[in-house]
Amino acid sequence: MSGGRTAYREDVDPAGLEGAVAGLLRDGWRLALVAGHDDGDGFRVVYSFLRPVGQRRELVVRLPHDRPHLPSLAGLSYPAGRFERELRDLFGIEPIGHPMPRRLVRHGHWPSGWHPMRRDAGPMPDLAPDVGSYPFVHVQGDGVYEIPVGPIHAGIIEPGHFRFSVVGETILRMKARLWFVHRGMERLFEGRTPDEAIELAERVSGDTAVGHTVALVQAVEEALGIEVSPAVAARRAVLLELERLYNHVADLGMIANDVGFGIAHIHTQRLREKLLRHNAAVTGHRLLRGGVGVGSAQWATEPDLALVAEVAAEVAEIVALTLDHSVVLDRFTGTAVLPAELARNLGTLGYVARASGLTVDARADHPQVALGPGFTPVTQEGGDVLARYAVRASEFAASAALLPLLTELAAVGGEGPVGAMGLGGERTAYGRPDGEGSGPAAGLGVVEAWRGTLCHRVELGPDGRLTRVKIVDPSFFNWPALPVALADTIVPDFPLANKSFNQSYAGNDL
Amino acid sequence: MTALALAWQVLVAVALTPLLIGVMRQLRARLEGRAGAGVGQPWRDARKLLAKEPLAADGAGPLMAAAPLVLVVSSLVSVALVPLLGIATLAWVPDDLFVVVSVLLVGTVALALLGLESGTAFGGMGSSRHMMIAALVEPTVLVAVYALSVPVGTTALSAILQARMTDPATVVSPVSLLALVALTIVVLAETGRLPVDNPATHLELTMVHEAMVLESSGRDLGWLELGSWLRLTALLGLVVNLALPWGVAADLGVIATLVATVAFAAKLFLAGAIIAAAEVFLAKVRLFRVPELLAGSFVLAFLSVTASYLIV
């Protein structure tokens, strides 16, 4: 892997960006993250690309402060277009040639011309009356009507507005408007030491505490040239699997509950609670906070493998009961199909992508721990609710089966290189490994969290404090897939379809 | 005297109804391994709601207050007309099958109008689904009870019940069994139970009955809840009395009426318990499968009518 690092990060001119990115995408690279930076004297935009196994590339574009114009890549990559809209909102960097240069992160009540990630942004001004909402597309025709849902919902979930254009019961078009929970998360990281950043990372998205924390510490370790022992890497992998277990079991129940099959829900809730109490015993926190640190990973007590195996057996039974139910199976099958082609073009990740037949799993593509040849990502071909349910069910079983191997690795103790991602450079004064181009010490963390591949990119100042943290939750890639999958779905099936995607609102809107 | 007996019947039905709902919810909770809120919770809910001031959405008209009352009155009238405790009837209000179905339909229409009244998308959606189901349910009810009325020669429910009491063998005839199965399915559909509607859901987009009452609150919501529960008592009571015609008072005597009250409560709770237990194992069918389910029940009812001419 270290061979691929010669041109790990390179500067490109704005004019040459499109050609460079097109070349990378053609060679099988995936755009994982676009991070903007306000360096005071100008803007710097970093494009991070990933390719299996364990390879990364970064392109850096510098823009003047007074005329921050960036050539749009929306025509090359759908996710790139979304990242550009995010840059436009947060930094005021204008994507030139973007087909839909509308607000993304800032909803309509944010004052125009105020860009919170700029150094000179100042305190947040008061929210204004709606100044920037672009209108919903008005679908016209006989019997077409609109159903506005949210942003406040009947259940205890996060805010999101869904606008359905419906004829009869069939959804013609659905527009999701999210971004009502912006907390300025990335800004909050700035100025903290990496150790102080852990508590923030654990709170980016409550159900992905381990995923975000591991991504952050990996990025920090790469920036500082810290190598962690295989035992630490294995312990992090164990915690990630424990996170996957308690989230997947809850989803398996809630998907069943949305078709009125309450008994499966009740039992998965019981099992989730069992796992949460087990989590509390392992790291001292039910959501597994407190287990991961920079260069370290620890637990209070060893994971109880017998308990996990017992829960896995019960989950297998609940899954069998659910899928043997003909009405449940009928509701799952063919509902909200996301075809593989669209899943690939939208850049979906995690179980959403795998249910549509795409083999994307950072555990295999960017491994931290050798899971052995026995590990292959679970995939399904259907792309419907059934496929997303089945992927979760199989992943639950696979995670439970992986845990004995991982806990064994964690117990072995730490000699030898971590492998895949270690930079191998010497740690210098502020920790930046030598020979990595110009600019501040930077690192990228790539983790297969339970929802999918999650990235953090950090930069550290000379004083060892974070100057920039860019977070990309898999939900950022997966949200646009939901309206696409709703073609030919009926309104009463929407909650089921939505639950089968189960995207994060908080992880998406930082 | 008859009026007194009917008043007693309405009183019993109103008293038993929240308990019936409570028993069904509690049993389902226990079967699923939950603690449950207790059998008295629906009664406490109703008492709480009826004491609260209703709030109406901007632009909502007088129907917001009127529709719940129409629903309750239609439910009370149907509870009075259906022979739940005895077969005594008032001369001036026929307990004719067609009258009962029409009275229930008045409540159905009131609910649908209520859904449209506040002008929200959910209400209209619920109303349209509700009317779709009602349009499929009503013919089945009529045809099923018509099949039962053919051997008796009248559509008066009390006469049909009386014939079954005097000759219980007719209960297990093919005609009767087919009609009862058809009736049971439509009762579940009409009262918003699984597999047609999920009374426990919080998901607005999947709702049928709950979507129509989303905008109602306080006293209005209390009447709506009571009215809907009473429909369940009336329809379920009719089915259990047709299936198990024992214990129904043949005269207006005090002892016979008390026996009938106890017997009716036992039968009603038994039927409620069976539905609650079955709901644990049921899931909600896709909305567009509901017509298939109800068409199936209509076919059963139709077969029952055919059989009533062929077999007798």
Image: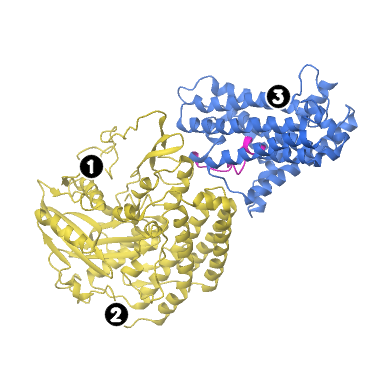
Report the quarter where the N terminus of chain A lies: bottom left
- Asked if the residue under mark 1 is in contact with the one under mark 2, i.e. CB atoms within 8 Å, the reply is no
Describe the element under mark 2 as helix, strand or loop: loop
Q: Position of residue A130 (x, y in %)?
A: 29, 33
- Residue tagged 3: B98
Disc 3 packing (10 Å; few <14; some 14–19; many ≥20): some
- Residue tagged 2: A417
Amino acid bearing label 2 = Pro
| Residue drawn at (33%, 83%) of the image | A415
Asked if the stretch drawn in magenta spans residue A404, the answer is no
Asked if the stretch drawn in magenta spans residue B200, the answer is yes
Q: Chain of mark 1?
A: A
- Residue B132 is left or right of residue A501, and the answer is right
Answer whether residue B282 is visible to the viewer in this image. yes
Can you say whether A426 is above or below A209 in the image?
Answer: below
Q: Chain of mark 3?
A: B
Describe the element under mark 3 as helix, strand or loop: helix
- Residue B118 is left or right of residue B38, and the answer is left
> Who is closer to the viewer here, B2 or B225?
B2
For residue A100, the mark is 1
Read off the magenta span: B187-204
Indicate the quadrant where residue A14 lies.
Answer: bottom left
Q: Position of residue A435 (x, y in %)?
A: 14, 72
Can you say whether A304 is above or below B16 in the image?
Answer: below
Q: Position of residue B63 (x, y in %)?
A: 55, 21
Give the color of chain A as drawn: yellow
Task: Report, in whole angstroms, how far the alpha carbon at label 3 lies from the one at label 2.
Answer: 84 Å
| Mark toward the viewer: 3 or 2 | 3
Q: Which chain is blue?
A: B
Task: Report, in whole angstroms, how far the alpha carbon at label 2 lies from the one at label 1.
Answer: 46 Å
Discs 2 and 1 carry the same chain letter: yes
| Residue drawn at (65%, 38%) of the image | B299
